[in-house]
Amino acid sequence: MAEGRTVPEVDRAAAARKAVERRRARAALKRDLTMRVTSPQTVLAHATADADSVAGSMRITDFLLALPAIGSGKRDRILADLHISAVKRLGGLGVRQRVLLQDWLDGRFPQPHPRDGRSRLLVLAGPTAVGKGTVAAHIRENHPEIHLSVSATTRAPRPGEIDGVHYFFVDDAEFDRLIANGELLEHAVVHNRSRYGTPRAPIDDALAQGKTVLLEIDLQGARQVRQAEPSATLIFLLPPSWDELVQRLVGRGTEGPEERVRRLRTAKVELAAQSEFDHRIVNEDVAVAAREVVELSSSSVR
Ligand code: 5GP
């Protein structure tokens, strides 16, 4: 090879580093798809908008395999049905292939459908460690016009938690009494340990005063509210990525390794329920996520 055409050592090292970064980014995106932190439709949209993006450079075979409950046999059948060659990358699909893929994804992975005419009752749920409590606390401090429901719980207060502000701390007997008297809108055992429930009266009062009410509760509770109040607006808070969710759980250091594994398993199950919700909000930045929740509340008053 002529002297002038050799690739300089630094360039080669930089290119290799870049290739490693791309591979890492693609692997992270695949985890996000598997864990449903992002939807396949979102990834396809990114790939379509920019064929050189991480999504665009993903092989169609890897994309399909990353989707929940798709193995290699099913993948090959899907590719044949959609007339897509296995060597294609997501950003390199033809228009017709893209439309067929989009239709197939919409059938298999339904997206939330925001509905009009919602009530002023908002429910914020999402997987463990996604930061629901932090977003709710931000709303409590910055939006006094929104009534944040105070739950009853049988768990012991943590340092700094005030009875009647963060929770109503009650014992099992009192919790049983609240249920027996029909005083809870919903209740559930969370993380296999303590009981939590939403007192009904303060919510009815706040709604009667024309206020917006926000409940920050777990998935089981959100489902019960949907049953009891079908017009409630259900919001699902998502982490920016699966890796970030794992980091947050490790970072807060409130759980031991065994409990962390258990919670991550629960988080995976919880993420699979997101299509039951009316809206999805990504908690990349607490203030931004809180604003998006508040905006949903104002748009739900009709
Ligand atoms: P923590 O004990 O960390 O404050 O809350 C644990 C979990 O309980 C969180 O996921 C929170 O959303 C949930 N939670 C808090 N209050 C209620 C409630 O009233 N009902 C239900 N179902 N879950 C709740």
Image (tube, rainbow, N blue to C red):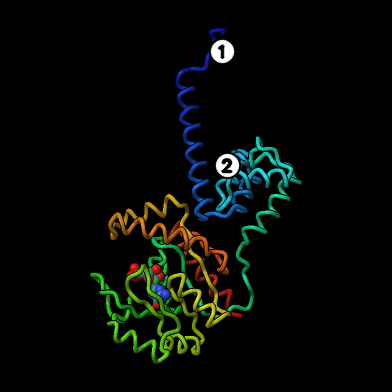
Q: Mark 2 falls on what kind of element?
A: helix
Among the 4 quarters of the image, the one containing residue 148: bottom left
Q: Is residue 109 left or right of residue 100?
A: left
Q: With 269 as the anchor, is 154 left or right in this view? A: left
Residue drawn at (34%, 89%), measured in percent from left and top? 177
Return the x and y of residue 104 as percentages of the image width and height: 69, 54
The percent coordinates of residue 30 (x first, y second) are: 52, 46
Q: Quadrant of ligand 1?
A: bottom left
Under mark 2, the amino acid is: Asp
Note whether 285 is above or below 78 in the view shown.
below
Residue 166 image-quadrant placement = bottom left
Q: Is residue 164 visible?
A: yes
Badge 2, how many Cα within 10 Å: few under 14, some, many 20+?
Answer: some
Residue in the image at 74% along x and 43% along y? 83
Rendered position, 83 above or below 173: above
Q: Earlier in the sequence, mark 2 or mark 1?
A: 1
**Residue 11 vertical position relative to residue 101 in the rendered view, above or below:** above
Amino acid carrying mark 1 in the image: Arg
The single residue placed furthest to the top in the displayed view is 2
- Residue at label 2? 62
- 16 displayed left or right of 150: right
Q: Residue at x 25, y 71 (%)?
A: 160
Return the residue nearer the eye: 33 or 10.
33
Q: Which mark is residue 5?
A: 1
Q: Give the percent coordinates (x, y) of residue 92.
A: 68, 39
Is residue 137 visible to the viewer in this orientation of the structure?
no
Residue 110: image location, x then y, percent: 63, 61
Q: Quadrant of the N terminus?
A: top right
